[in-house]
Amino acid sequence: MSANERGQCPPHGTRPPEPSDQALRELHRVDAGDFSTAGEASASIKRVLRRMGIDPDVIRRVSVASYEVEINLVIHSFGGTMEMILDGDWLTIVSRDTGPGIEDVSLAMTEGWSTATEEVREKGFGAGMGLPNVKRNTDYFDIVSRAGVGTTMRMGFKIQ
Amino acid sequence: MTIGTIRDLLSAEVLAGEGLMELEIRSACGSDLMSDVLMFVKENTVLITGLVNPQVVRTAEMLDVSCIVFARGKRPPSDMIAMANERGIAMLATCETMYVACGLLYRGGLPGSPKRGEE
């Protein structure tokens, strides 16, 4: 398997259409290693969805997936962003970081596989359930990563 | 089971959400591993944990967990109590161990969170 193939795995679900010019967008920065604010981006996304009267079951799936991704950014990345894009029937969250990248995405998607430190585990995370749980809660999920470059994840949720 | 009943069964002290004692709880989860909590828990759940850090409150917020119980005499700092109050989450502290606290609630009729595939 080439390094390029190891950096992705088959997408899950049907990819949402490209967002229109009318899409509502909200961009959040997530800092590496900052556990004190970890979860604020996801809480903000949750508040927006609540205000818009989105179905509570959808909000819970979005919240779990976005929080898992946000925690991953804090634990594993050099820092990154989470963008919420609300357009028509779809809510999309795109997470982008600037490294270090995942060498083997299939391994990272395996339940129980984790490279988290003891310090992270003491905080209650790093059990290797994060990415599988993200996928489970989405209607669409893809992940592309290049070691030394960074990781981009796209999560789609049908909101109607 | 109401949060008030949980308080009584566990002889717990109410740290946050004094006004939420009539709120109905449908299931319970006992864990120090927030990764697991994020896999299984639904709304109207009580989370019993020995882990004391702000991510416990944030995890509860994400899942609409209505009540957090800190077991084995652990007490969160005041900023965590404030976080729970701001988010409308009840916070209790009991001297019981996690095993006994879970047992008391189960015996009182409160079931566990659904297992995977049973949701």
Image (spheres, coloured by chain):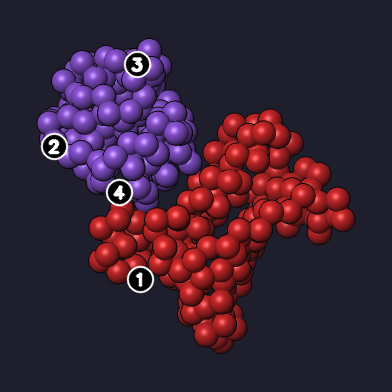
Chain colours: A red, B purple
Three-letter code for the amino acid on which mark 2 is drawn: Arg
Amino acid, disc 4: Asn
Cα separation between marks 1 and 3: 41 Å
* Vertical position of residue A159 compared to residue A3: above or below: above
Q: Are marks 3 and 2 on the same chain?
A: yes
Q: What is the x, y in percent for residue B86?
A: 44, 33
- The N terminus of chain A - image quarter: bottom right
Q: Chain of mark 3?
A: B
In front: label 4 or label 2: 4
Secondary structure beneath dot 2 equals loop
Q: Which residue is mark 1?
A: A115
Q: Which residue is mark 4?
A: B53
The reply to whether the C-beta atoms of the residues labelled 4 and 3 are less than 8 Å apart is no
Nearest to N terminus: mark 4 or mark 3: 3
Label 2 sits on residue: B72
Say what secondary structure mark 1 lies in.
loop
In the rendered image, residues at marks 4 and 1 fall on the same chain: no
Under tag 3, what secondary structure? loop
Q: Residue at x 73, y 57 (%)?
A: A15
Please check whether the numbered discs 2 and 1 fall on a single chain: no
- The answer to whether tags 4 and 3 share a subunit is yes
Q: CA distance from mark 2 to mark 1?
A: 30 Å
* Neighbour tally class for label 2: few under 14, some 14-19, many 20 plus, Cα within 10 Å: some
Return the x and y of residue A96 as percentages of the image width and height.
Answer: 60, 68
Question: Which residue is drawn at the image coordinates 45% and 38% (left, top)?
Answer: B61
Residue at screen point 50% across, 58% down:
A70
Q: Is residue A152 visible?
A: yes
